[in-house]
Image: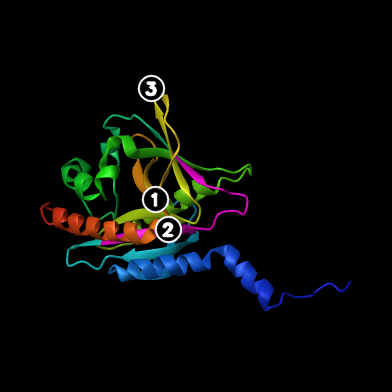
């Protein structure tokens, strides 16, 4: 049997398909249809290591406001053995209000002055504004040791934070993960776990209690609907920002 010394076109196309490049292009095109300017392969400097890191996609809302609004997106093609991601939820009271938006250093305004406007602007639909529907973690349903879901969320948050740091003016970044397998919500209640429910997307609290932010995890099948809601949310954020006195 003759062993191939190099990959032919079919092999390369198969490899490309596994990398998720098609998912990145689809996500960029969907956001562009909603008025975003989508750019693939942006980079930032990792504050902890000083190394250059790549962001899959940055989408600029291009709104007529003094605040630049970005969706910083990590597109994740799941492993062949993964069947789904699971968003774990719990009764958290109103703790979800204490997340902090990812902002540029020049957006010098206290979070307590901004939260009444942004909690409403970030609702993206009544189902997600319900405090019972904010997830505290997302896990991949797989037997593999590498949790793709955890890594994707961390990369999205790190990317959004890095991109925000490099903006000279006023900027706000929303980290987003787009994935290609079903997403289920598992709600942990005092009376016992509720039945598993498939959901189009979920908002996830991420980080320590003193410095948590939010990440949106979206399935590809509901990307168009989510992009529209994100666009309307950014419109509201722009309006909210016009009501706050920012001093750089």
Q: Are marks 2 and 1 in contact (CB under 8 Å)?
A: yes
Residue 97's image quarter? top left
Report helix, strand or loop for mark 1.
loop
Report helix, strand or loop for mark 3.
loop
| Coordinates of residue 6 in the picture (x, y in percent) | 75, 75
> Which quarter of the rendered picture does the C terminus lie within?
bottom left
> Which quarter of the rendered picture does the N terminus lie within?
bottom right
Alpha carbon distance from label 2 to label 1: 8 Å
| Coordinates of residue 113 in the picture (x, y in percent) | 16, 43
Q: Residue at x 55, y 54 (%)?
A: 78
- Find the magenta span and give its range: 69-87
Q: Are marks 1 and 3 in contact (CB under 8 Å)?
A: no
Q: Can you see residue 50?
A: yes
Q: Residue at x 47, y 53 (%)?
A: 155
Mark 1 lies on residue: 200
Report helix, strand or loop for mark 2.
helix
Mark 3 lies on residue: 190
Q: Nearer the viewer, residue 84 or 29?
A: 84
Q: Which mark is residue 221?
A: 2
Q: Residue at x 63, y 42 (%)?
A: 143
Whichever of labels 3 and 2 marks the residue nearer the N terminus, that label is 3
Residue 61 shown left or right of residue 217 in the figure:
left
Q: Nearer the viewer, residue 60 or 42?
A: 60
């Amino acid at each position: 049997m003759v062993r191939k010394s190099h990959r032919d076109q079919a092999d390369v196309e198969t490899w490309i398909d596994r990398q998720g490049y098609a998912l990145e292009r689809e996500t960029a095109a969907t956001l562009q249809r909603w008025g975003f300017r989508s750019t693939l392969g942006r980079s930032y400097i990792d504050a902890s290591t000083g190394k250059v890191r790549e962001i899959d996609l940055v989408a600029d809302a291009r709104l007529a406001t003094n605040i630049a609004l970005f969706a910083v997106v990590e597109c994740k093609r799941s492993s062949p053995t993964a069947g789904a991601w699971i968003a774990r939820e719990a009764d958290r009271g109103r703790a979800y209000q204490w997340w902090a938006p990812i902002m540029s250093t020049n957006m010098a305004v206290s979070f307590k002055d901004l939260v009444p406007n942004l909690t409403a602007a970030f609702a993206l639909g009544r189902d997600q504004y319900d405090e019972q529907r904010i997830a505290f973690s997302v896990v991949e349903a797989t037997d593999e040791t590498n949790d793709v879901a955890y890594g994707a969320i961390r990369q999205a948050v790190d990317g959004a934070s890095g991109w925000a740091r490099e903006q000279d003016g006023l900027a706000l970044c929303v980290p987003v993960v787009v994935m290609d397998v079903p997403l289920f919500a598992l709600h942990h209640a005092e009376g016992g776990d509720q039945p598993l429910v498939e959901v189009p997307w979920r908002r996830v609290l991420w980080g320590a209690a003193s410095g948590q932010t939010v990440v949106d995890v979206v399935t590809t099948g509901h990307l168009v609907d989510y992009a529209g809601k994100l666009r309307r949310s950014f419109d509201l954020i722009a309006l909210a920002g016009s009501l706050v006195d920012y001093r750089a």
